[in-house]
Amino acid sequence: QVQLVESGGGWVQAGGSLRLSCAFSGRTFSVYDMGWFRQAPGKEREFVAAVKWSGGSTYNADSVKGRFTASRDNAKNTAYLQMNSLRPEDTAVYYCAAAYGGVSWYIRPEMYDSWGQGTQVTVSS
């Protein structure tokens, strides 16, 4: 059974940066695609970014392109989300998720089998 634990959230002023981490355990990390989602109060869970099992390919939502970067370290069983140029509209609970690696990009929540508990990111103006 996959277990995911996020860390790195917090409060930051607009224009600042944060890096989220997602520690993976329970299965072989290097065969899983990793995704990042966020959910603001009153809104649906939204895809942010994903990184393929090999770490060689990433995919971002249009809303974060050029600002956020997903990555992973398979030796450390950890996925990352580097967030730069943060905006107040980025405020949300951020979740990492895992899905067994495939050919397509997994950009919908129902495509993922396992989820972390979430970490709050608050960006003030």
Image: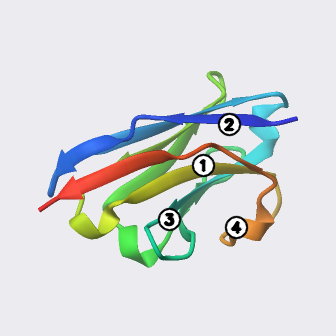
Question: Label 1, on which residue?
Answer: 96
Disc 2 to disc 1, C-alpha distance: 7 Å
Disc 3 to disc 2, C-alpha distance: 17 Å
- Crowd around label 2: few <14 · some 14–19 · many ≥20 (10 Å): many
| Amino acid type indicated by mark 4 | Pro
- Where is residue 93? Give x, y as percent: 46, 55
- With 27 as the anchor, is 121 left or right in this view? left
- Disc count in the image? 4
Question: Label 4, on which residue?
Answer: 109
Vertical comparison of 125 with 98: above or below: below
Disc 3 to disc 1, C-alpha distance: 12 Å
Vertical comparison of 120 with 105: above or below: above
Labels 4 and 1 touching (C-beta < 8 A): no
Marks 4 and 1, the one that precedes in the sequence: 1
Closer to the observer: label 3 or label 4? 3
Which quadrant would residue 10 be assigned to in this image? Answer: top left
Labels 2 and 1 touching (C-beta < 8 A): yes
Closer to us: 92 or 96: 92
